Amino acid sequence: MNNIGVYGLGVMGQSLARNIMQHGFSVSVYNIETEITKQFTQKYPKLFGYESLEAFVNSLEKPRKIILIVTAGRVVDSVIASLKPLLAKGDILIDCGNSYYEDTQRRMQSLQQDGFYLIGSGVSGGEKGALHGPSIMPSGEYRAYCEIADIFTAIAAKNEDGTACCTYIGKEGSGHFVKMVHNGIEYADMQLLAELYAILKRLYPKDRAAVQKAFHQLNQHNLASYLLDITEDILQKKEQEEWLLDKVLDVAKQKGTGKWTACVSLEYGVPVPSLIEAVEARFLSSMKAQRLQAEQCYAGTQDEETSNEQLAADLCKAVLLAKTSIYAQGFSLIAAVNAQCGYHIDTKQLAVIWQNGCIIKSEFLKDIYQAYDKDANLTNLLVSDQFTEYVKQGREDLQRIISFALQKGLYIPVLCSAMNYVNGYTTASLETNLIQAQRDCFGAHTYERVDQAGVFHSDWLK
Ligand code: 6PG
């Protein structure tokens, strides 16, 4: 009898199966296209491949543990439906795809009525992470998680101190929820780097080496990150004698997790402007034909190219502020949904399991860990000492960079929204009193006062 099964042998499924096998567990594998199973097990004969679903399920020790790693959405429902008649009470399915967290909740409830368990598990790190150690975010019934904890902890990435980048996240679909927000942050981090690239290209128009060097300088200390690592590599990649990046079409695709994060933030009324802007930036990028046409209308309005060493030197502190703002937004969304849904997510642990293995892996997460370690109930990273310092130290630099970029006509939505979020969140008295007055004026929607309790209406036009 094998320890665990993997259903779905796409790149992620294959990598996960190999990772589990390499850690000494016996793994049954299944794919709807039997040819794929055959080829895969020929290459890795220590894995046990099955052509029939029944044989696959029956090859597993009880309670059976079956990882599903298939395309999110309806496919997950149909795979569960095909497995259900073959399962025994207490068996555990583990959805390791990028499922929408509310779908996971619905599936958990339905499976539990029949005596089965579903663990919804975010897995980050792409193909290489899945093979060499991903960051894993499982949630659902704790006793079901305990059955897979050994395997998941063994295959997860490890931090410098040996801690596994896998922890039980909380109730219901909370694992897929935090993975979704991880991806929302991932979108903002990526757009931030694209905006820095635009600024650096403007600062060093004909000097690719200077752009490479600037990214290298950024990728140090607490800004060191996986996304900066790959950006450095990408900037050095040549095809024949030309930069490969220059050949890549500027249309960014998306599978939907960033958009879900944006929608959930709107649903819960939690501002995450930079995460939303990053999604919008991908939409805008896809309007290639319109952008080409629109640029013609403004041809010749760009000013002279400039080189400015000081601005390049300002980048580090400015980026630290922007990252502070992005993560403050993302973590505040997690806190709000956690509180409302009663997931029992330990935010500090997210800062542990995202330090390695995942796409947003960075040194910066150590600062976030420290902040939540000091105060587990922190309302927003912006009010934590270390991050307050980053904001104070980076504000002028970021203002200069934003002003330079806007003067040059560059599109920098994440940098602007990151600064604006900080400006708004740290202003005790906003001018939204004018909005309340307008609402009351045209619609008698009433308003509250700063000097008296109660609800008021005035005749503003008299
Ligand atoms: C990860 C990634 C992974 C996937 C993204 C890509 O954490 O390993 O987030 O889940 O690569 O979802 O998303 P887009 O196609 O939407 O950019």
Image (spheres, rainbow, N blue to C red):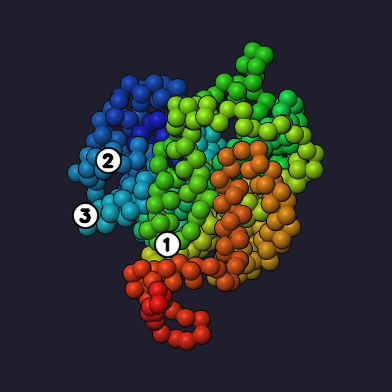
**Position of 457 compared to 85: left or right?**
right
Q: Split into 4 quadrants, where in the image is the N terminus? A: top left
**Position of 372 compared to 459: left or right?**
right
In which image quadrant can residue 410 be found?
Answer: top right
Residue 96 horizontal/vertical position (percent): 40, 44
Q: Is residue 99 visible?
A: yes
Q: Which residue is mark 3?
A: 114
Q: Classify 174 as above or below 28.
A: below
Q: Which residue is mark 1?
A: 269
Going by the numbered disc 1, the residue's amino acid type is Gly
Q: Is mark 1 within 8 Å of ligand 1?
A: no
Rounded to the nearest angstrom, the CA distance separating label 2 from label 1 is 28 Å
Going by the numbered disc 2, the residue's amino acid type is Arg
Q: Which residue is mark 2?
A: 74
Question: Residue placed at 50% from the left, 40% from the top?
Answer: 281
Which residue is most to the right?
309
Question: Residue placed at 57% from the left, 64% from the top?
Answer: 425
